[in-house]
Image (cartoon, rainbow, N blue to C red):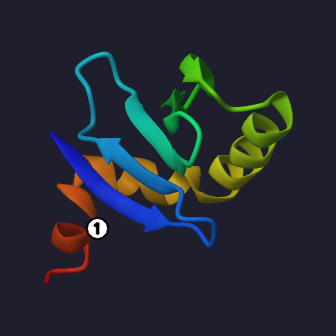
Amino acid sequence: MMYPFMTLDDNTEIVHSEWLPEERVRVYIEKPDPNDCFHSASCYLPEYQWTDISGFTDAEIQRYQKFLESTAHLIIQFSKEGGFDSAANF
């Protein structure tokens, strides 16, 4: 299951999985692109292991890396509690 986390100012969508049995969470990042539909990448926390990068530049991945470093503690917490809505008791 994937849970919504945030939409950035450039329409980049960030979602995350539940806490996985291997004690990590998958963060999926997707951004619309007028030329090739979507750019996407996955990053596994807490190790910040990037996989399946498609269309993003190195500079964009570095931007997302910094973003994840500042929010990883929330994403990990929400992944263990069933997403933001469950963690916030909505």
Task: Tell me if 20 is positioned left or right of 67 in this view.
Answer: left
Q: Would you say 55 lies left or right of 89 here?
A: right
In the image, is residue 6 above or below residue 13? below
Could you say which is closer to the camera, residue 22 or residue 30? Answer: 30
Tell me what residue is drawn at x 42 percent, y 47 percent: 76
- Circle 1 is placed at which residue position? 84
Write down the quadrant of residue 20 in the picture. Answer: top left
Q: Residue furthest bottom?
A: 90
Q: Residue furthest front?
A: 35
**Residue 62 horizontal side relative to residue 34, left or right:** right
Location of residue 87 in the rendering, given as x and y in whole percent from the top left corner = 24, 70
Location of the C terminus by quadrant is bottom left
Question: How far across and down, in percent of the image, does residue 67 sit?
Answer: 69, 54
**Whole-percent x, y for residue 5 in the image:** 39, 61
Classify 10 Å Cα crowding around label 1: few (below 14), some (14-19), many (20 and above).
Answer: some
Residue drawn at the location 77% of the way across and 41% of the way down: 60
Quadrant in which the N terminus is drawn: top left
Which residue is at 45% across, 65% downward?
6
